[in-house]
Amino acid sequence: MQLGFLLIISLFITIIPVFGESHPDYSAMDNPSEYILKIEEHTFSIPYEVDAKVIAIAVDPELTSLLIGLENTFDSVFTIDLSHELISAPNNEFAILVNGLEVDYDIVSDSDSSTFTFFVPAFTEEVEIIGTHVIPEFPIGIMAGLSILIVSVIMVSKAKIAIFRW
């Protein structure tokens, strides 16, 4: 009984992902351009398609957003594929601002990345994609070192050492 149950479960685990929705693999993009973004030791290849010139892409860790600078923009649909390691949000609840105004967008996600599609009007200069996590986050190593330092200071201050007595 248990062996049969395990076989059925393993069969579902191996077959069902084949029928699941897969990433469009840029199928929505006919002729994608690519921007290479370097952040610390990470390098991200960002495929996109828009009727404009992308002059810069930068991460704003304080606002957990990705900023995209554009020039020579015409009315067009902006399609961009972003890695979850670069920017993510629970339940794909992102906010996209075009020249400071929030716009509607379509999103297709898989386990590695999300592809956003939204309209940008002529003369658009800035697009901001806001998530809840962007790289670089506050590193765990720094947090661990800081907590060890704090605990050490507390322990030394509580100790009855003659150096710290007035």
Image (tube, grey):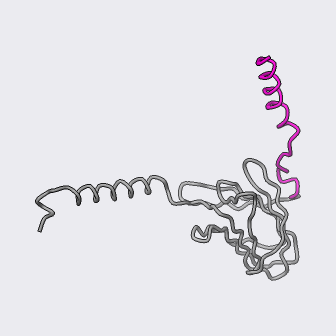
Q: Bounds of the magenta span? A: 1-29
The residue lying toward the viewer, choosing from 69 and 153, is 153
Q: Residue at x 56, y 60 (%)?
A: 136
**Magenta region, main secondary structure:** helix
User: Residue 70, position in %: x, y?
Assistant: 74, 75
Q: Is residue 150 above or below residue 101?
A: above
Q: Is residue 142 above or below residue 63?
A: above
Does residue 161 appear left or right of residue 43 in this picture?
left
User: Residue 71, position in %: x, y?
Assistant: 75, 78
Please tell me in which quadrant of the rendered image residue 124 appears: bottom right
Residue furthest to the front: 1
Q: Residue at x 23, y 57 (%)?
A: 156
User: Residue 132, position in %: x, y?
Assistant: 65, 63
Is residue 17 magenta-colored? Answer: yes
User: Residue 51, position in %: x, y?
Assistant: 84, 71
Q: Quadrant of the C terminus?
A: bottom left
Please tell me in which quadrant of the rendered image residue 118 appears: bottom right
Q: Quadrant of the N terminus?
A: top right
Q: Residue at x 80, y 22 (%)?
A: 5
